[in-house]
Structure formats: structure tokens, C-alpha cells
Amino acid sequence: MILPTFGQLLAKVRKLRTHLLFPLLGSSYFTTAKLSNQISKPHERNILLMGPPGAGKTCVGQIVGQRLGMPVIDIDDDVLERAWGMSVADKLSEIGGDGFIEEEGKAVCNFTATGSVISLTGSNPLHPDAMQHLKRSGLVLYLDVDAEDIMQRLSRMKVNRIVGQDAGVSMREILQYRKKFYERWLDARVLCGTGDSVEDVADKVLRTLGRYEDSESEMFISTRSQMSSDPKFFSDVVIEGLAPDGGLYVPKKGFPKLEPSEWLRISSMPYAMRAVVILENCIHPVDVSPVELSTMVHHAYGQNFANRSVVPLKHLTDHQYILELFHGPTASFKDLALQLMPQLFTHCLPQMCNYLILAATSGDTGSAVLNGFRNLKNSDRGRIGVLVFFPEKGVSEIQKLQMTGFQEGNAKSVSVLSDFDFCQRSIKQMFGDSSLIGHLAVEYATVLSTANSINWARLLPQVVYHCSAYLDLLRNRTLMFGDPIDVCIPTGNFGNAMSALYAKQMGIPIRKVICASNHNCIISDFIASGMYDLRNRKLLVSNSPAIDILKSSNLERFIHHASRGDGSLVRDLFLNLERDRFFKISETLRQKINLEVQAGWCSEDDCLRAIHEVHAATGYIMDTHTAVGKVVADRIHDKTCPLVICSTAHHGKFAPAVLKALQCQNIPQDPVEQLEKLYTIGGREQMHGALMKSMRDSGDHPHVVCEADFSKLVDEVETVIQDSFLRVQ
């Protein structure tokens, strides 16, 4: 008997989910995602247009029905008024708002139709039984129209049939109150840009329907393959992490590009809602429905972040802005991905076995992974273990205490007497070891996955905050949409830089991404010369340990992006790197890279000097990684547009170096006392409460120290599995 591979099992699960979902529109509707009049087959299921009063549901429904050759039904005119024998306005006047909702719900529950475009009333979603009845008949599309556009339309109309008007409540309040009901029932969002006409909205409805049906258009491929013989979808790549050929997964057709009017809409939203709308465009609803995604996002970016803005953008000086990415529970930018990624992971995983999440960390990823997976529901945590490897002498003392304080349940961290590159290389080797994978599957019913940025679900949420930074500048009227910005990012594994380039692909006008390195300047050397040379190169310890990396995993995605998806080139380059510790790209490709990316590096002295000078001039305390970015930005940026510097960690995580930079005398040895000293300098506004609490609660947690031996790391993997999961009987 030949057992199916894990990938084949995932594909079967995916196929089943798709089969269950797409009786919704029949067997082969919207086989092209092009404009609607190409769709010719009769529909068995309904298309339900939902939205607030004034969203244009009736007009849009008529256009969509005409283009698709489907009957059009308006709930107000064709259902309610016929059932009641009077106008909707008269019925509302007769029985009042509460009674109207109930009577409307009863009438809708007695209504049936198939193969129609149905324009709902603005109040249908307020009656749960009616909406469940309607939702069973087809696909609910939410016309998410700009509130200002709605107010303008309603001002030109005689409006006397909107529930709630008689209570003296303003129309804006009615729209705001109802929004949560629309968000509860949608199957797909039709995001309408500011000023969109009904024809524009109808076109978007048809494109949304096309996307909903054509899930295969959003397949993923490996960076090392030209064509994917085994198509992968979002749910597959989240679980698998690394492609079987050793490459990284990327969307086959790249990122969707939003229109300027849509970005203007998103700019008015809070961060969590921005994330929902952006990620809806990147995750197919077959994999994660909009309602489920919204729940995950709001859970991730709710009370877990100390700042209400989640990622506040602060003006530093002149044209420079600081994007603070450290307000999450473990005080680094990794929280922005790792408060969401574990939820996506558990949503996508099949109910067939246990999973061990492996992560290598240069400091920040470890505690963020452990915290993120710890916050899952107990029912999900029972099948998931987490094991973090970190370099014993390559992280700050506070970073180490953050990780070793998580030795509980199925979560564990192990230090290695080597560097980050060894830890990351060992994890990749485990994924490529078929005998190990088979042994863990047969003996323990356990599958390995990863939470490093090689996993697509780790990288994707980072795209959101790069978009959000630009939208904040837009909302603050620092610029008009279309005006460019540059972004400077402390760079080690290239994931943060890659996510900025993906934000650019989505339509954010990022001109250049500036990669900033410390004296481990492999990235800046590569950008300048086109040579990636690890020969005779040793990793140097620095004050910015999170970017102490020589083998940058996500550079593979970047070269795939810059070479327009040349999988053969990427495969050859990175096989050369494995074999010879060296590769060189063509001068043509290097010049193309330089159109999007610049790079530089700074010394340890320059880093500390920048911390001191910025604090002296502004009172703002940067961490060591942000300081690296500041130094490189000052040298490279031409000052012709705003510059956003990503502040990737709170300065308290690197307290001794920062205190040294601030020329403090008698720096204490105790981490809590170090943080207290920093807070006396920076004040309460620059304090990170969760970091301080974690240090006060850390205590003395002994941890396993492992030799730099691949087999020893494998032993730790098996030990964690044995401690976490029951042995298969």
C-alpha cells in the first residue's frame, strides 16, 4: 500500500472544502475573472447584494443581472410591498422600527428564489433568521461604500423608509450601527472607492464573483520552480512552510493591486480594519472566510497592543518619520505577524495529526512565536508544540529571558552554541530529511512546520504595516496619494524589506526600500556588487543582534521577484550558495534590483552615536536596530520625499547598549534595574509595560544548551514531541 504524501492529503482537504463551498454558484460559473458578460451559463444559486441604505444595491443589481442574464429581485419592491399590500414607508410608519424588523424578517423567511440577483434592504441583516435563510440560497456580497458617498446620495433623495429615522438618530449613527451586521454576514467584500459610480461598483461585483469562483488563479509556486505540477493554495503553504524543492512559496500571479480610490477609503480606517481589508485581497475566501479573518485580525490587534494605533507613525525630524512596530506583547515587529499567524495556522491545519512548529531566532522571533502560540485556544494548543532554537551568545540578556520564561506546556526554547545561521540551516535540513519526516509521522503522528518568515503566513501580515504607514501620511495630509515615499528597514533575513516591496506591488507608492545592515553587511555588499559571498566570512556579534545574519532566507523571494519569476535562475543561484557558499547575479539583474532597493551599513560606534545624538536633539530613544536604520538613511536618502524608518524593537530589549549610548554611568547588571533606569530617562511615554512585566516575572529559568550538532538538535525535536504528544499506539 502506497501512502499519500502530506501534501497530497492537504490537497484532498482543500478539494473537499472547495466542493462544499461552491455549490454556491453552480459547477462552473465565472470561469474567467474578466468582465461579466463572458459568463453565459445559467445560475442555480442567488447573488445577494447587501449594504447600507444609499449603497446603490438596486441599481447595481439591475446592471449585474443584465450582464449575467439573470432575473433581478428587489426585496423592498418585489417582496415586502407585494406581501404587505402597502409601501415600505407606510408599513414603517404604521408599526415602528422594532416591529418593522420583525415583520420584514417574517416576509423574507417565506420568500424563495433561485438563480437571481437579489438586492437586499439595508435592514435585512438586522434579522438573523432572515439572513440565515437568505444566505443558504447563495453568495452574500457586501457593497462596502464610502459613508460620504452614501450621505451625498441620501441628501439628494427623499428618504422616509429607513429603520431608525423616527428615533431622532442621525443617519451617520445609523450607518455606523449597522456596519457590524454587514460585517457579520458577508461572504465577500466589494470595497468601493471614494467617488465610485454604480457602474464602477457593478464592475467590482463581477470581478469579486470571478475571484470567488476562480480559486485556482491564486495558487502558490516555489521560488525554485517554473511551473507548479502540484498546485498549492494558501492553506497548503501555511501548513507546509517550506516547499519540497527547498524553495519558498510565493503567489504565482503576484499581489493584487488596489486602486487609488480604494486606498483613500482604507486610509480612514483604524489599523485592524485596514488589515482586514488588505488581507482579504491576499487570502482567498475558500481558505479563510472574511468573517473568520476579521475575527482573527481583531483578536490579534486588540488588547495585545499597548498603543491604540497599533503601529503609530511619529515625526522624527525634517522629512524623517519613525514607524513604531514594537507595541506588541514581546516588544518587537515580529508581534505584528505572530499574533495573527498562529490563528491562521490552526484554521488551515487538517484534523489528522499533531504539529511541531520550529523556529530559529536571532532574538525577537523566539519570544514572539512562543507568545503567539500560547495565546491560542486550549483546544488548538493541544495538537501544536513549539520549539525555538537561538544562539546562546547571539541574543541580548533580555531577549534570552523573554524566551526562557516560556518553558511551559508544549512550548520550549533551546539555545545552541553557534549562530543564527546554523540554527536556521538546521531547521531547513530537517524539512529536507525524508527519513526524519517519515519517522516523526509514523511514530508520533507529528508533522513539522515553521514560524520563521520563510512561512508565507509570517510574511504576509507585515505587508499591512508598510501600507498603513503611507496611509497615515495620507490621512495626516503630509502627502497626496501618488506622492512617493522611501522606506528604511534594518535588514537581516530580508523578510521585512520583502514585505515593503509587496506593499509597493499592491499599489503603495514606495519609491525605494533602503536596507540597513550592521557590520554583518552581506546584504549591502550584495546590492552593491551582485555577489553573495559567504566564503571566509564569519558572523560578528553586534549591538543589533536581530540582524546578525549572513544567510538571508527571504533574499530568495526578492531575486524571484526581481527576475520576474525565473525559478530556474533562483534554483541554480541558491544551490550554488549551498555548495560553494557563493553566487553572482548578472549586471542586468543587479541594475534592476537597484531601481527598487538601496543598501548601506554602519559601524557599532556610529550606531551608538546616533542613539545619543537623536536623544539629545529630540528626547526620543531609539533602539540599536532603529539606529542602524537612521545612520544608513542619513547617508543614502536624497531627502526629496518623506522617509519612513522602521523601528523594529523597543529600546528596552537592548538596555545595556542603549544606556551606554546615552553615556550613563554605572550601568546595572539586573535587567529590571536597566529598564527602570531607561524609563527615568525617557519618561512614561516611552515605557513598554509588557516588557517590564515580563522581566519582573521572569525569575531564574534554567534552559537547555545544545551543542552545534545537527543530530543534537534532532534529539531536542524528538524530546519535545515525546513530552508534548501521546505516542501513536
Image (cartoon, grey):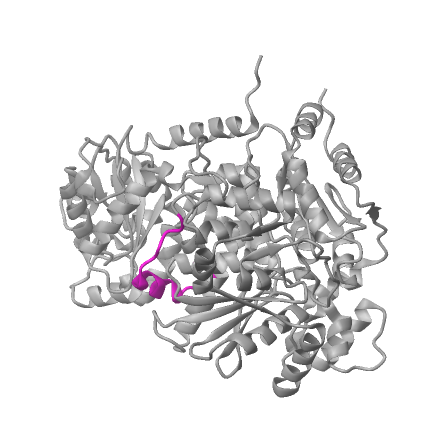
Residue drawn at x 43%, y 28% as measured from the top left: 15
Side of 618 where 512 appears, left or right: left
253 shown above or below 629: above
Side of 406 where 501 appears, left or right: left
In what quadrant of the picture does the C terminus appear? top right
Q: Position of residue 51 (x, y in %)?
A: 29, 52
Side of 516 where 442 appears, left or right: right
Q: Where on the picture, by quarter, is residue 475? A: bottom left
Q: Position of residue 83 (x, y in %)?
A: 17, 40
Residue drawn at x 60%, y 52% as measured from the top left: 338
Q: Where on the picture, by quarter, is residue 209? A: top left
Q: Position of residue 565 (x, y in %)?
A: 43, 46
Q: Residue furthest top?
A: 1
Q: Is residue 193 visible?
A: yes
Magenta segment includes 391: no
121 shown above or below 469: above
Q: Position of residue 560 (x, y in %)?
A: 47, 49
Residue placed most toward the observer, 659 or 190: 659
Residue drawn at x 42%, y 49% as measured from the top left: 282
In what quadrant of the picture does the N terminus appear? top right
Magenta segment includes 267: yes
Residue drawn at x 26%, y 48% as measured from the top left: 205
Residue placed most toward the observer, 718 or 147: 718
Residue placed most toward the observer, 103 or 253: 253
Q: Is residue 357 visible?
A: no
Residue placed most toward the observer, 291 or 362: 362
- Residue range in magenta is 254-273
